[in-house]
Image: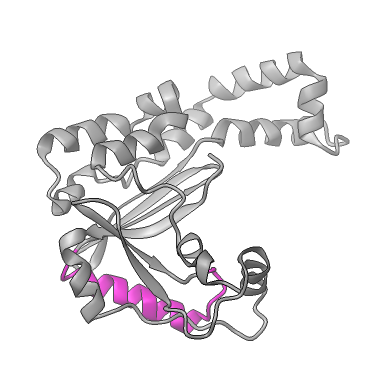
Amino acid sequence: MNEFTSGYLILKRDEEKVRQSPPPKLVYPPNERGRALTNDLYGKLPAETPHFFIKTLNEKWSVLLIDDTGGATTESKRGLDQWILESSKQFPLLHFETHDDGFDYHLFSGGIEEASLEMNIAIEFSMRVDLVEQRYPDIEDPYIFFDGNPEINEALRLEVENSAEYQTRVAQQYQHKNIAAFEVFNVPLQVIAELEQLLSVESYFADRLGQVEKFKDILGFPEMSWVSYHYESRDLRE
């Protein structure tokens, strides 16, 4: 995964509800580091730029994109969290995010978080790095070590994959997936069954790299790729 996608998926029919009661604007301390880095990467936003966008993806789905670079004040983040919970009493929201190591979702409905998943495709690799650092403390760069010692690398990979700890870590990712909660998005039972099969330990071992695209396809929002507030606002940046 080389993209970064982030937003709150909503049903298209609920767009107007967001406009009538929009999310609060996050507040950032002066010269906040994350904000400064974002401005360096993407360009500075004009002061009048909206703090959120609603992007229609297709006939069923839209996505709410909020200006959130992660360094906002604690109080303003609490305000946004509260807005999400209160809004979920009126319509469901699915926060969806992809990143280099996998993808996450958090489903909000009825004023609570009903389901969540944080899927990491790099569990085995990170455990392998931990083993190298434990057994070869003088190694400065595990990546270079792996490249120069393919036999040791393969032995460590097999050791991790056959360990009980690896099996446990993979299984823990799916403890709160609560696939049944997706029914609030008018998802038919057949799709619920497909999601249940996809978001499983067995599927992870068979094709963990393919889970995120299959997840989007099954739910019907394949357009949710390279989508974020920063991508949406890039044409407005100076």
Can you give x and y, in whole percent of width and height, for residue 151 in the image?
75, 13
Q: How many marks?
A: 0
Q: Which quarter of the image is occupied by the C terminus?
A: bottom right
Rendering coords of residue 71 (x, y %):
57, 73
Name, please, the residue furthest toward the top. 151
Residue 32, percent from left and from top = 64, 78
Q: Is residue 143 magenta?
A: no
Q: Nearer the viewer, residue 156 or 7?
A: 7
The correct choice, above or below, for 6 with respect to 162 in the image is below
Q: Is residue 192 left or right of residue 97?
A: left
Position of 182 with respect to 205 (left or right) is left
Left or right: 16 in relation to 95: left
User: Which residues are the magenta region?
Assistant: 69-91
Residue found 19% across the figure and 72% down from its top? 16
Residue name at image x 66 percent, y 30 percent: 128
Would you say residue 83 sits in the magenta stretch? Answer: yes
Q: Is residue 106 left or right of residue 190?
A: right
Question: Residue reaching furthest right?
Answer: 138
Q: Position of residue 140 (x, y in %)?
A: 85, 39
Query: Which secondary structure is most common in the magenta stretch?
Result: helix
When the figure is inspected, residue 119 is found, relative to residue 152, above or below; the finding is below
Query: What colour scheme has been applied to the protein in the rendered image?
Result: one colour
Splitting the image into 4 quarters, where does residue 23 fall? bottom left
- Residue at 32%, 47% (x, y): give it: 176
- Tell me what residue is drawn at x 50 percent, y 83 percent: 27
Is 179 in front, or is 12?
Answer: 12
When the figure is inspected, residue 114 is found, relative to residue 75, above or below; the finding is above
Q: Pick the residue in front: 227 or 182.
A: 227
